[in-house]
Amino acid sequence: MPANLTPQYMEAEEAYKRATTADEKIAAVEEMLRTIPKHKGTEKLQADLRKRLARLRAEGRELRKKGKADPYCVQREGAGQVFVVGPPNSGKSALVGALTNAKVVVAPYPYATPLPVPGMMKFENIQIQLVDCPPISASNCPPALTASMRTGDGVMIVLDASSDSCLDDLDEQLALLRERKVIEDAKRFLIVASKIDLPDAAINADILAEACGEAQLVRVSTTSGHGICELPEIIFAMLGIIRLYPKPPGKEEPDQNSPVTLPAGSTVADLAEAIHRDLPQTMKGAKVWGSTRFGGQLAPREWVLEDGDIVEFRT
């Protein structure tokens, strides 16, 4: 049976060939497994990819034990990983501190964050990882840092809206991230105008919004709290993921506190694969509550699921 590999899979395979770090390779193999067609013609390839992924993860753990791990590498946790970047004193550390449990350093001087600092942000019943990055500029942007960013799920660019240079800062950040291939056509990102409570910040934010084009701009202030409560939902939407709830047969309700998160557009078969690699082959069907016309409707393998769907597999 022919493999019929998808363009998305081929792109992930090319990313693996270009990868220079263990984390880049792990991210590429994970994407290959996510996008590979699930049928008998790819079973051997799927098994090979799982073995490769297990080996890469084991090698990464061994390097960390020996203290040889890349200091810019951040182990991915939660439902998504978002790197928070910006020029010096943009307010990104204060923002990450306001949204997560990260032990960030907020200081009035530049480069107070020398290495990435991860923290977990709660959105309803899931956790999303935010990574406070060292300030970047055309003259100060370590290749290892942008290599780590490329393995993430999204980027949040934070700019000081009260600064007269905020528009130039935006241009520099976008140019740098595109040059380093952190932001590409498929990469999800948003722009945050911080310190919106300061003089001239509101006017500058309007100018930034015009310059952003189709990119989303969010106005926030960690001092006044403006926009902080809304930001987790905006980040969740940016990531393009959905929460799904597998329901064990015979139980009335699934565990609402432990959803499975998958990319938007995922199918019943994709959820089955995420639960157990053998389930797509052994399941006889599935009942779906939520996106179907009526609760508990039988859905085929190719049924596209939506955020909040409950799925019971019949084996």
Image (spheres, grey):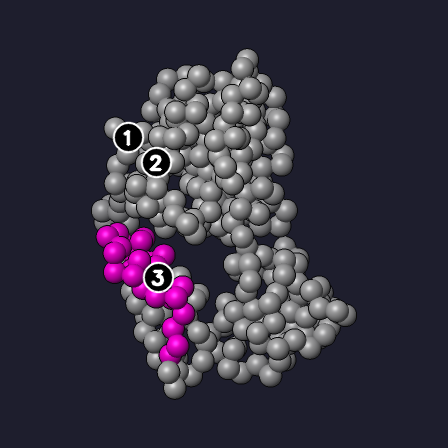
Q: Amino acid at mark 2?
A: Ala
- How far across and down, in percent of the image, does residue 118 sit? 42, 40
Q: CA distance from mark 3 to mark 1?
A: 28 Å
Mark 3 vs 2: CB contact within 8 A: no
Q: Residue at x 33, y 24 (%)?
A: 111
Residue 197 in magenta?
no
Reading the image, the residue beneath label 1 is 138
The part of the chain drawn in magenta is 3-30
Reading the image, the residue beneath label 2 is 175
Q: In terms of depth relative to the viewer, which is nearer, 38 or 311?
A: 38
Residue 15 in magenta?
yes
Q: Amino acid at mark 3?
A: Glu
Q: Amino acid at mark 1?
A: Ala
First of labels 3, 1 by sequence position: 3
Q: Which mark is residue 302?
A: none
Asked where in the image residue 304 lies, by quadrant, the reply is: bottom right
Mark 1 vs 2: CB contact within 8 A: yes
Q: Residues within 10 Å of mark 2 (few under 14, many from 20)?
A: some
Reading the image, the residue beneath label 3 is 11
Q: Residue at x 36, y 57 (%)?
A: 27
Relative to 13, say whether 89 is above or below. Answer: above
